[in-house]
């Protein structure tokens, strides 16, 4: 779980980064550059007292008055001193004198470790290493994620999906008007002669798209399917209108399971009900079941269908081709995410992949967290 109080961090710089992350969670448009600018303010003495510190950060982190309430809440939550004190100063002798008299929280805020010594460059290197570890984890193939890093990956995915959700909401709210309404414009400006001053625009209603996810859980996908399923569950917690299925030798609808609030419960129920896990792969037959049972009801011009599979099909490639074509005809956009595409030198030579390629709007990788987050542009209207 992310730390939401400054005393949970080992340095003032880390605490500022943590505070910036908290502000992003509350939809403030801030990033690492804001944390760096905040450090510069503190170096110039703006952190000597809490009120000055709050006003200084607010001037950096808020772009309009509507954001003040969210910022003030984040500031109170994160920087509430209670019995702790903080003193940010660049004076080595003064800080070393005060360090022996202050508690750990004060030293963290000042950028010093608890033994009263000024932080060495290795501490800065440690911070950079931590950031580098997160960046590296985003790029790590799911098959190479260790058990130790698995929990951190879950937390990182949740945080990044929350940010993605906020960005998608902003994209949806940026353009609230559509093309110019010529008739209304002329009527409003008719008394002004030939000069048209006010342009009246038509209201444009944003289309809501339904997302259909088809996840391959066959044996060849074992190394990826667990992470991809957790990603689908996280995606469902942030976006509406999602239908989800798993398939190998048969197709199973899992929408009701991913709707659960706790992923542990969802995974447990899926284990009991999805008997096709780690089996063979008959993609064509499973897509036929999907078309026969669900496609007419859930696919239309406002649906995006995403298949997550390596395309290694044990069935008839002709059946695969005909069924994927049916899906293409009924959906607005057909996307195929293949974990193997992230492998160096990969070529889509498998029969199933060859059959599907001509009908795909998008063919991308799904081997790490970074590749999955590239779905943002596809989901912009979801």
Image (cartoon, rainbow, N blue to C red):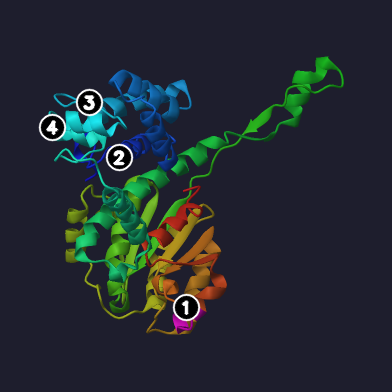
Circle 1 sits in a helix, a strand or a loop, which is it?
helix
At a point 31% along the width and 52% down the height, the residue shown is 125
**Alpha carbon of mark 4 to alpha carbon of mark 1: how far?**
66 Å
Above or below, 206 against 93 in this view is below
The numbered mark, 2 or 1, whose residue comes first in the sequence reads 2
Q: Which residue is mark 3?
A: 80
**Alpha carbon of mark 2 to alpha carbon of mark 1: how far?**
43 Å
Whether residue 352 is in magenta: the answer is yes
Whether residue 96 is in magenta: the answer is no
At a point 48% along the width and 24% down the height, the residue shown is 64
Q: Which residue is mark 1?
A: 353
- Which residues make up the magenta segment? 348-354
Q: Which residue is mark 2?
A: 18
Nearer the viewer's eye, disc 4 or disc 1? Answer: 4
Pinpoint residue 330: horizontal percent, then vertical percent.
52, 62
Along the line of sight, which residue is nearer the eye, 76 or 129?
Answer: 129
Pinpoint residue 35: horizontal percent, then vertical percent.
39, 37
User: Which quadrant of the figure has residue 105?
Assistant: top left
Circle 2 sits in a helix, a strand or a loop, which is it?
helix
Q: Which mark is residue 100?
A: 4
Q: Is 83 left or right of 299, judged from the image as shown?
A: left
Above or below, 232 against 364 in this view is above
**Alpha carbon of mark 3 to alpha carbon of mark 4: how far?**
22 Å
Along the line of sight, which residue is nearer the eye, 127 or 261?
Answer: 127
Nearer the viewer's eye, disc 2 or disc 1? Answer: 2
The numbered mark, 4 or 2, whose residue comes first in the sequence reads 2
Contact between labelled residues 3 and 2, with CB atoms less than 8 Å apart: no
Neighbour class for label 1 at 10 Å: few (<14), some, many (≥20)?
many
**Alpha carbon of mark 2 to alpha carbon of mark 3: how far?**
14 Å
């Amino acid at each position: 779980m992310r730390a939401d109080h400054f005393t949970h961090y080992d340095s003032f710089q880390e605490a500022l980064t943590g505070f910036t992350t908290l502000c992003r969670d509350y939809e403030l448009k801030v990033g690492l550059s804001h944390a760096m600018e905040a450090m510069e303010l503190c170096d110039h003495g703006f952190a000597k007292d809490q009120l000055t510190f709050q006003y200084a950060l607010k001037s950096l982190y808020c772009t309009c008055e509507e954001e003040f309430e969210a910022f003030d809440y984040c500031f109170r939550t994160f920087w509430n001193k209670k019995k702790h004190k903080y003193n940010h100063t660049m004076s080595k002798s003064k800080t070393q004198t005060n360090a022996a008299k202050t508690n750990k929280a004060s030293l963290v805020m000042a950028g010093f470790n608890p033994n009263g010594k000024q932080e060495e460059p290795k501490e800065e290197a440690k911070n950079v290493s931590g950031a580098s570890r997160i960046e590296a984890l985003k790029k790590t193939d799911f098959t190479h994620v260790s058990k130790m890093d698995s929990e951190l990956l879950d937390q990182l995915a949740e945080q990044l999906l929350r940010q993605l959700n906020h960005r998608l909401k902003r994209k949806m709210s940026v353009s609230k008007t559509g093309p110019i309404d010529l008739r209304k414009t002329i009527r409003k400006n008719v008394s002004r002669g030939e000069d048209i001053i006010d342009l009246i625009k038509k209201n444009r209603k944003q289309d809501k798209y339904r997302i259909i996810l088809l996840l391959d859980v066959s044996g060849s996908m074992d190394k990826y399917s667990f992470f991809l399923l957790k990603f689908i569950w996280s995606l469902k917690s942030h976006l509406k209108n999602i239908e989800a299925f798993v398939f190998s030798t048969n197709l199973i609808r899992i929408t009701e399971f991913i709707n659960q609030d706790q992923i542990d419960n969802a995974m447990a129920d899926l284990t009991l009900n999805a008997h096709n896990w780690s089996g063979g792969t008959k993609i064509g037959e499973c897509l036929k079941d999907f078309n026969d049972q669900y496609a007419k009801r859930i696919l239309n011009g406002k649906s995006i269908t995403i298949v997550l599979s390596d395309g290694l099909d044990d069935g008839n490639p002709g059946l695969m081709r005909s069924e994927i074509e049916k899906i293409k005809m009924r959906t607005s956009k057909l996307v195929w995410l293949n974990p193997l595409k992230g492998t160096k030198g990969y070529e889509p030579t498998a029969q199933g992949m060859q059959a599907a390629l001509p009908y795909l709007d998008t063919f991308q990788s799904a081997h790490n967290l970074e590749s999955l987050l590239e779905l943002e542009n596809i989901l912009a209207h979801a």
